[in-house]
Image (tube, grey):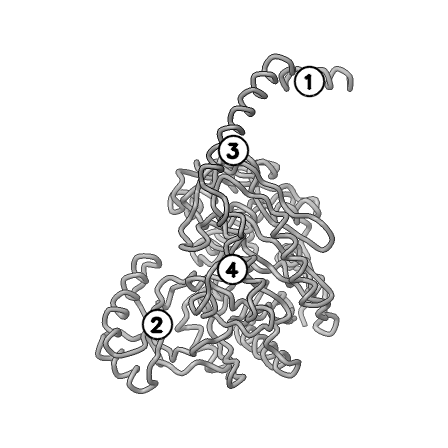
Amino acid sequence: MLTPDIRPMYSKILIANRGEIAIRVIRACRELNIKTVAVFSEADRDSLHVFLADEAYPIGPAPSKESYLNYPKILEVAKACKAEAVHPGYGFLSENIHFSKACAEMGITFIGPKPEHIQAMGDKLSAKNLMKKANVPLVPGSDGPVETLEQAQKVCQLIGYPVIIKASAGGGGKGMRVVTEPSGLESSFRACQSEGLNYFADSTVYIEKFVTDPKHIEVQVFGDLYGNLVHLFERECSIQRRHQKIIEETPSPSLTEPLRQKICKAAVTAAQSINYLGAGTIEFIFDSNTKEFYFMEMNTRLQVEHPITEYVVGVDLVKEQILVSLGHPLSFKQSELKQKGHAIECRVCAEDPVTYQPSPGVIRACRHPQGPFVRVDSYAYPGYEVPIYYDPMIAKIITWGETRQEAADRMERSLTEFVLTGIKSNIILHKTILKHPKFLDGSYTTQFIEKNFEIIEPDLFKEVDDHVFLIIAGIHALNDRKNKDVRQHNIPANWKRIGRRMQLRI
């Protein structure tokens, strides 16, 4: 094993992201006594991460490609403010090999894996070939890219329908189509090629056998510079809408202990095959009927759902990322890691809970749930305007319990406490899911929401006439105006109060 070459602690880190993940990194840095730099687009000038960081700089217009994906501008800011490292969070530039390389060229540490790791696992076909060599189980499918419709037809005839067509560079549910019969192959094949080109500048696609009603189970892995590589157990992420996760939990209710050990061992083997560095996630498709699992992809970054692992395993993954990037060996051994209790995460999104359409707008009231073993990662606050340009997730609620039922009961209580008005949210969707028999017994799959599921509306909204809400809104607006007039005449301005306090301090 190599001798640790530990560098001094960073004095300043730039966070190349926004929203709740930027705030999460800011908090970890603050506990390590590291100054933080936020960047923001024109649409995010009033975002909470901007106020919480030690410094904040604008990087461009609202569209992502002109701001959060504009890495030359971000690195220009990093150089100007003398940041020694960049934390990319997740999404945006977190798996961008060009950004990672550009950081290295400028002498700025990219807090994440090496560029070769991003390249190897970022392309799904490349990753599949590596996993095949490492003897990690793979879903039957094409051996490489499928370039023509004729090739696609031959592959489908060989492995049988249903199949799933995937863009090689895809992610986040983009560039994926399930085909159940030959008549639908051509349109789906063309659509995946088109989406791959439009979203990821790569039209390459491949085909796999579609596992009907699968579960989505992933394993958190972590490696350092000295060959230490461990797993921090699994997370079940099967409750999804449009191929995007909305509820995650750990441990998975679907795994027996022997299966858990087997899937975690496979994940470590996968990461060791490329000498992986930092935090990563190996994602598997799990067939609950046959009890077989297959490698799906690797995410070479921190995951949205990392807090449930932190709760159950007791490790601060963001701090560990920072320390490993400085040359520290992992602060724990595999034998020291245990699962304690159960954790659940619900992603709260500004969206219609039925159609899943984004619901941007001004948040009128916002009160986060509190209490024992409840964590809320959020950037929502009263008066904040949720922009339409980015992912609609505005908060995550994470609860822990000694048992799965206790964690679920605590989540249900937390969702009831969460007050969010002015925009639509999926809170009622989460409440309905938690009461569903398939969630309660853990038998849900990735097809759970699409198959025989509908939101149960509270009786309150069924019985009250819409005019009542209009009258209440009118009364509330009138009272608000009266209170505003009183405040203007009777309450001194903030700058006067602050001035008086400063005089008293002097």
Pair 1/4: label in front: 4
Q: Looking at the image, is mark 4 or mark 2 earlier in the sequence?
A: 2
Circle 2 sits in a helix, a strand or a loop, which is it?
strand
Residue farthest to the top, as pictured: 489
Mark 1 is surrounded, within 10 Å at the Cα level, by few (under 14), some (14 to 19) or many (20 or more) other residues, namely few
Residue tagged by mark 3? 472
**Cα–Cα gap, marks 3 and 4:** 33 Å
Does 464 sit above or below residue 213? above
Residue at label 1? 497
Q: Residue at x 43, y 42 (%)?
A: 360
| Separation (CA) of disc 2 from disc 1 | 62 Å
Q: Earlier in the sequence, mark 3 or mark 4?
A: 4
Please report whichever mark, 3 or 1, sits nearer to the chain's N-terminal start. 3
Q: Quadrant of the C terminus?
A: top right
**Where does residue 437 sit, x and y in percent of width and height?**
56, 70
Q: Are marks 2 and 1 in contact (CB under 8 Å)?
A: no
Q: Real-space Cα distance between discs 3 and 2? A: 47 Å
Note whether 498 is above or below 271 in the view shown: above
Number of residues whose C-alpha sits closer than 10 Å to that of mark 3, classed few (under 14), some (14–19) or many (20 or more) = few
Q: Which mark is residue 246?
A: 4
Tell me if label 4 and label 2 are in contact, CB under 8 Å: no
Q: Which mark is residue 178?
A: 2
On screen, residue 12 above or below 407:
above
**Mark 2 or mark 1: which comes first in sequence?**
2
Q: Nearer the viewer, mark 3 or mark 1?
A: 3
Tell whether label 2 touches label 3 (CB within 8 Å).
no
294 vs 278: above or below? below
Q: Position of residue 345 (x, y in %)?
A: 60, 59
